[in-house]
Amino acid sequence: MDDAVEKRSLLRGRKHARRKAVQALYQWHMNALMGEEPPTDQFVNDFLSYQDMGNADNDYFCELVKGALKHRRRIDSLLADQMIRDTEQVDAVELAILQLATYELIERIDVPFRVAINEAVELAKTYGADQGHKFVNGILDKLAKDLRSVERQAGRAPSHEPK
């Protein structure tokens, strides 16, 4: 397989992993609202067992979900600093998208900040409320100014993820 085909496959797998990760985080939030918070590893394994993951990069999916849940308090604190409302008042789908993208901004510096934001906006357009993508974009743009200031100043703005 040549490099271009391999790169497209990687990007497609990550895109699908993000979509499934949003679904998993949403499901986790719904369970938590009902007082059920299974251990993260068990939750992720159960999700993988019962979902058709399609072309998703399962390793990336696991990292995103486990990472977002592990760092949930820090992520929610960072989000709360950018919002005029509490995270508990944010739509659960949009909160899952914000947590996922914030995790990528914090921990996955190999993913350009614009990719993390664009992917989150696309997920919000697909799964969020009518104008939720604007809310998601605004919050993540503010976060990226702080979390990725060096990258922003350097003008690193590729339209795709590196290998």
Image (tube, grey):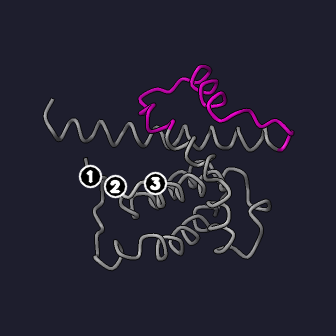
Secondary structure of residue under mark 2: loop
The label number, if any, that marks residue 90 in the structure image: none
Residue ID at (65%, 27%) = 42
**Disc 1 from disc 3: Cα separation:** 15 Å
Secondary structure of residue under mark 3: helix
Q: Residue furthest top?
A: 49
Q: On the rendered structure, is 163 left or right of 32? A: left
Q: Amino acid at mark 1?
A: Pro
Per the image, the residue denoted by label 3 is: 119
Q: Residues within 10 Å of mark 2 (few under 14, many from 20)?
A: few
Q: Nearer the viewer, residue 89 or 75?
A: 75
Question: Residue 138: x, y in percent?
Answer: 56, 72
Counting residues from the start of the chain, the first of labels 2 and 3 encountered is: 2
Residue ID at (62%, 39%) = 23
Q: Nearer the viewer, residue 13 or 145?
A: 145
Q: Is residue 90 magenta?
A: no
User: Which quarter of the figure is the N terminus placed in?
Assistant: top left
- Tag 1 and tag 2, C-beta contact below 8 Å: yes
Question: Residue 79: x, y in percent?
Answer: 64, 67
Magenta stretch: give its range.
33-62
Question: Residue 83: x, y in percent?
Answer: 68, 73
Q: In the picture shown, does residue 31 fall above or below 97? A: above
Q: On the rendered structure, is 62 left or right of 3? A: right
Q: Amino acid at mark 3?
A: Glu
The label number, if any, that marks residue 162 in the structure image: 1
Q: In the picture shown, does residue 45 fall above or below 152? A: above
Q: Residue furthest left?
A: 2
Examine the image and state in which quarter residue 116 appears: bottom left
Per the image, the residue denoted by label 2 is: 110
Counting residues from the start of the chain, the first of labels 1 and 3 encountered is: 3
Residue ID at (86%, 39%) = 34
